[in-house]
Image (cartoon, rainbow, N blue to C red):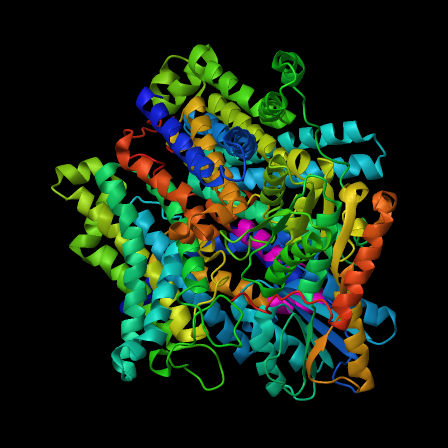
Amino acid sequence: MQAEKQSSSLARQILKSATESSLIPFLAILTAVIVGGIIISIVGGNPFQAYRGLIEGSLGSQKALSETAVWATPYIFAGLAVALAFKGGLFNIGAEGQLALGAVFSSLIGYALPGWLGFDLPTIIHLPLAIIVGMIAGGIWAGVVGALKAYTGGHEVINTIMMNYIALNTTSFLLNGIMKDKSPTNVIARTPMIADSARIPTIFEGLRVHWGFLLALLVAFFIWWLLTKTTLGFEIRTVGLNPDAAKYAGINVKRTITLTMVFSGMLAGLAGAIEVTGLNFRHELGFSIGYGFDAIAIALLGKSHPLGVVLAAILFAAMRNGATRMQFITQLPVDLISMLQAFILLFVAADAIVRYIYRVKSKGERVVLTRGWGG
Amino acid sequence: MKKLYLVLAALIIASMVLSACGTAPSAEDCASPDVFCVGLVTDVGKINDKSFNQSAWEGVQKAQTDGVADVVQYIETTDAKDYAKNIAQFGDAGYDAIVTVGFALGEATVAAAATYPDIHFIGVDQFQAETTEGVSGLNFPEDNAGFLVGALAAMMSESHKIGAVCGTDVVPPVWRFGEGYKAGAAYADAQNGTTTEVFVVYHSDVGFDKTFTDPEWGAQTAKSMMDQGADAIFGCGGITGNGAITAAAQAGAYAIGVDTDQYLTLPEAAPRMLSSAMKLITPGVAKLIAAVKDGTIESGNVFGDAGYAPFHDLEASVPAEVKTAMETINTGLLDGSIKTDVPPVKP
Amino acid sequence: MDWKRFSFIALVIIVLFGAVVMVGQSQQRPILIITSMLATTIAVATPLTLGALSGVFCERSGVVNIGIEGMMLSAAFFGWLAAIYMFHVFGFPIGISITVGALFAVITGGLMGLLLAVLSITFNVDQIIGGTVINILAVGLTGFLNRQLFFGKGSVFGGQVPNSPGVLPTIHIPIREIFAPLCSDSIICIENIRAINRVFDQKPIAMGAVLLVFIAHFILFKTRWGLRTRSVGEHPKAADTVGINVFKMRYANVIIGGCLAGLAGAYFTIESVPSFEPLLTNGRGFISLAAMIFGNWTPIGAWAAALVFGASQALQINMQLFRESIPPQWAFLQQSYVVGLAPYILTMLILTGIIGKTTPPAADGVPYEK
């Protein structure tokens, strides 16, 4: 009897803490949806049809669910990339460029390696190789920025922005030149299709969702483990919170900063590599527009926690994916989605507003994600 | 806390009730054979781009006002990976014709034609290397249009320096406009014994999403050309080109538009608008939609019309011999006696 | 700003100009190339300068502003919209419509600044999040309204984008009139003076930006207001103890910063091209941010950095104009993506510390709690 009571109260406690931690984000999303709805009505649209379209398009069928997962995959990787950098006290605006380079090099291995070797590779070697090379490309790209930050003090925000432009130009150069698909029917700046042996299989027959989505979830778990259970993770977090203290504690701050950026870039590179090997099977100029910037919002929305990032990525993916259906039904512009996302981010970030509206008491804790430019 | 739950409950109930009330879209049943539905999928770009997406959509709307189509809808693509999904929205709803705009949708269109054999696809700017049943690629000889305005600019220029500000040369139609412009100027030089310096600048150093939407860059580039003495500027590249055209008009140089008669779409440049290199997307699309309904449509490549726009306000300042020469060139291009020698794709 | 940094920036600009002169001299007289590039440089640098000044004011008072891009974009849109409404709906003359448009852009920027201030100062929201919210919101709001107001059935203007009343006029500085008589009939001399005159004939916002650089420098370093602003950004606790209202100073400076970003937005739709396009700022807000850091949080330094970016854009445009004169062994330079890389690589090189470390205000990005 006593034990039963205890366990039920424990269950209630767990439930209570779960509701409490998800209450604010939930209310924030609700508020954003209401504000968005009001704006839609003001401009003469029908918010209920719009939201119905969004939900139908993102969750309404097997195909819709599959497409949401397809959108979520790069978002999870890129969101983790930005979140990991945040944990290390670094702001990686350059996920976009790292992602593009990851995609370029992954597709290079995907289509060219069998030709270089002169024989076909089995999937078990070719696919991981394509993914890893893409990942390393992203890692090196970001690692340069990390090393510049650690050893010369060059600011990572500017350097990642600059590296973004350099990556985009380099990609244009490669895709228009030596890496362009030479087949006579092709007029587009894109690589040839990658070999079958470098492709990630789909999970279900007839749907586009592939095993890369599960890999994304696994990687999110791995990042959580890395950050909370390992020495390296502890070092990253300590340097992120207070580099001076970290130095006194005997942590090699410079090495840690460089490594954080390398890991962050590897995650972004993975996003590109998985898009190539799992979905597009080639890299094309014009792909990956804005993932890097969406990733910043996702990392912020997920409070830089890997689980939060996964949930935020799925939310953003659902909205982007549902947008098509929404437009099909209502003919409202898809920019509506960006506006909704901004409101969600606004209300999650400014939880004081939400707490005020719904009279939820604050527990007085505050998560500091970023630390300005210092360090 | 109690208050909170009350507020929450009220909100949730309200939203459920209201969403139940939200009426279903009154879209007519496109699956029925009596209702002729046309859908349009844009390239990564907006439907109101004042350029090819918009022209194609106006063609679809024209089909509706002409009484050909009963229902018309569009979907804007925000990411290349959605091409197939967006086409499928229309396909699954049983549309009768689907217009896909831009060369980048070419493969997705061909693939969709296999999935939806009952639907006819119209691919704007999609050259069909081999004929696919159910797909008509609508193409335009942009090099001819560029050639015409290039010749015109060379004949009208007093400084014998002319310029073109274009979007990225990765897109074949844009490249054909630019190269046609050069060829046209060279042709006019050969005819008249002049030497014209031609500046052609492509905006290739930015992301694909930005190359056609950077009016500020277009304006600055046009100004640089005019600083070097150019007195006729051809803007070929969506909104980037519009920036160049407007800047040229403001500086008093000749402005030359692209795609449609931009005298009508860029009123701020109208007084100095010499002509436009036109590819007639809107009538081309409308015509093909009508053909789909009639059943007279043919798969494979269909060529639309290209030409140059009237001189409008500058009618009086164009000498009669230039007008005659333009007519001669246009006829020559149409009957094949004059060739631009511009290959379809950048080598 | 130290001399080392200035001489480096000067050197970079000279190299950029020199490269174009080398390539283009067979087609054009060097002086004409240089004046043309200078004119481009100043025009291109205008929004970057103003954006960077926006950052300087915000961050000197201790608030990180990565929302410059979003502030510019929304100001460009609402300024343009106001000009259109004034002209077409209310029927005001062109000059008044444009001026009101510019004013509205500045006000929009100020309101965006206020939003950032409310979020980061009152609600203690992480400042980077505040900026990101502004960036995303601006993209969504301007894209959505631009479409809903102007396109499709039932839109305010019936599906037609009405033409904007126009852009601000160029202000003529009478250099030509003063110096031309000295040339005594030499045509080349007159041409040169004309070309030099073109550099100085700029539009009001471009001229205003240069003035504002020096005004900002004066305010920040020579006035009590500036001293207070800087103390709030360096050491808010100490400032508070001597009776400076930290919150008020931060609010005021962030709103000033917003207005400056708003003026940068006005440059796009009121001064340069009379039309609005979604995403027309194209990342220039982020480049401004880079210019601000590059200039070590000083107005003059930020301006110099903005000029470097302007010069490199001028290089990229002019290299393409003279593409045919590029010697064959440098043929790869004909591709615009290769030339386009130069400014970014240069920036990174400069940042590696050849010119010394940049030091942000000590309390930049740190929320102040009593």
Q: Is residue C95 above or below residue A91?
A: above
Q: Which residues are magenta?
A: A323-344
Residue A41: in sight, yes or no? no
Write the residue at 41% across / 41% down.
Answer: C343
Badge count: 0
- Quadrant for the C terminus of chain A, please: top left
Left or right, B55 with respect to C326, comes to: right
The reply, left or right, for residue A201 in relation to residue C41 is left
Percent of width and height locating residue B222: 63, 42
Most common secondary structure along the magenta stretch: helix
Give the image location of residue B246, x and y in percent.
70, 42
In the picture as drawn, the residue positioned furthest to the left comes out as A250
A224 vs A171, left or right, is left
Please give the name of the residue rendered at 57% of the width and 77% of the height, measured from the top-left corner: B108
Q: Quadrant of the N terminus of chain A?
A: bottom left
Residue C141: % across, % down: 63, 48
